[in-house]
Image (tube, grey):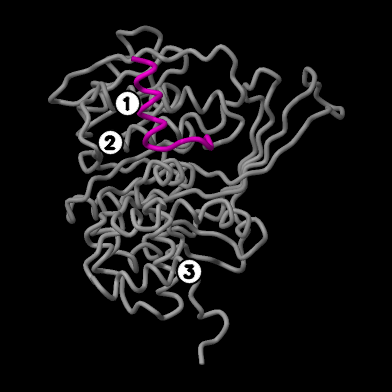
Amino acid sequence: MENENQKMNEKEEIIFNSIRKNPYISQQELADILDLSRPTVANLISGLIRKGRILGKAYILNESKQIICVGGANVDRKFYMKEKAQLGTSNPVRSSQSAGGVARNIAENLGRLGKEVVLLTACGTDADWEAIVQASDTYMNLDYVTAFPSISTGSYTAVLEGNGDLLVALADMEAYEHLTPGALRKNESLLARSSAIVADLNCPKETLAYLGNFAETSQVPLVLVPVSSPKMARLPEQLQQVTWLIANRDETETHFNMKIESDEDWRLAVKKWLDEGIQNVVITNGKHGAMAGNRDEGIIHEPAIVAAEIRDVTGAGDAFCSAVIYAWLEGKTLRETVLAGSVNAYKTLLSEFTVRQNLSTSELQKDLEEIK
């Protein structure tokens, strides 16, 4: 007789029987049968594997070409100032808590956009990680996360002014020092099958160098997303292995030890990145928009979509990166790709959530049509 925790629920029964009838059925076909998203079906299949009802998943995952997101997954705590901030005394605020982290946020955005995503990160075995799981596992596969009982799950605490601008942020990212090349090598077959590897600069420098070499050898696209100006020191030396770099002005200024004070400077900075061997580059510059370039389509400028009322700036950059990755994988032009990023960032600025809750492929398409 089955143990209680091995019993299948109704959706798992449908998936199990469908696979038994057709072992080569795709996850999208299963999603259509159940009227669910493909990432949700992927997680149900992972549950069947854990229960021992399916012995392997290569025949499903090999055709699905997952996106692997490597880097930060932390608890975001936000404190919203009710009045002008005063140092050295108590300030009245309202607060919220949600799942965050650059790699995790990008993974959720892509999961909501119907992509199958795996998150590779390091975490503690604490209540913060359980909160992240509860918020995340619908949109991404967490089966390959490495847990360390001796560490704390990453956390990010932001204090925001009344207009939504960031006043100060505190980041505890020590957990990601455990995201070493050794922690990733056990997942090399997973990385080799992916449609893209997306890594943030929370990863140690040696890990990013390892991913660059692996991407070049395995011919898998590599997307790098800086986290902050100080983390630019972790950028790999060999940038010709990078398919996409999506950085902001401050991060670019730090890397090249230059000031971007004009459109000419901005365009020159894109060219400098391209000259280092990166295939596609985007430099965002807040309300001034984004400058992007590659060797085939040249360098273009996409104006920002100005939000009349910003609810929260947290997550807008991750939303931009996610939509850029999504549109690129869908075969869009450079301009269409950057526009998708701008639209998703704009809509996220209007939301109080780090990842906007109404995001989907149809919603993004509708947003793009409205902007056009």
Nearer to the camera, 150 or 60: 60
State the residue in front, 186 or 34: 34
The residue carrying mark 2 is 244
Residue 210, image x and y in percent?
30, 54
Give the mark nearer the N terminus: 1 vs 2: 2
N-term-proximal mark, 2 vs 3: 3
Question: Residue at label 3?
Answer: 10
Residue that carries the numbered disc 1 in the rendered image: 282
Query: Residue 127 in the image: x percent, y percent?
Result: 67, 60
Magenta span covers which residues? 356-372
Q: What amino acid is labelled 1 in the image?
A: Val
Occupied quadrant, residue 87: top right
Q: Is 280 situated above or below 10?
A: above
- Three-letter residue code for mark 3: Glu
Mark drawn on residue 215:
none
Q: Secondary structure at mark 1?
A: strand
Where is residue 181? Give x, y as percent.
36, 60
SS at circle 2:
strand
- Taking the magenta stretch, the answer to whether it contains residue 330 is no
Percent position (x, y) of residue 113?
38, 41
Residue 163, located in which quarter of the rendered image? top right
Q: Is residue 237 left or right of residue 149?
A: left
Could you give the CA–CA distance between mark 1 and mark 2, rounded to whole angstroms? 8 Å
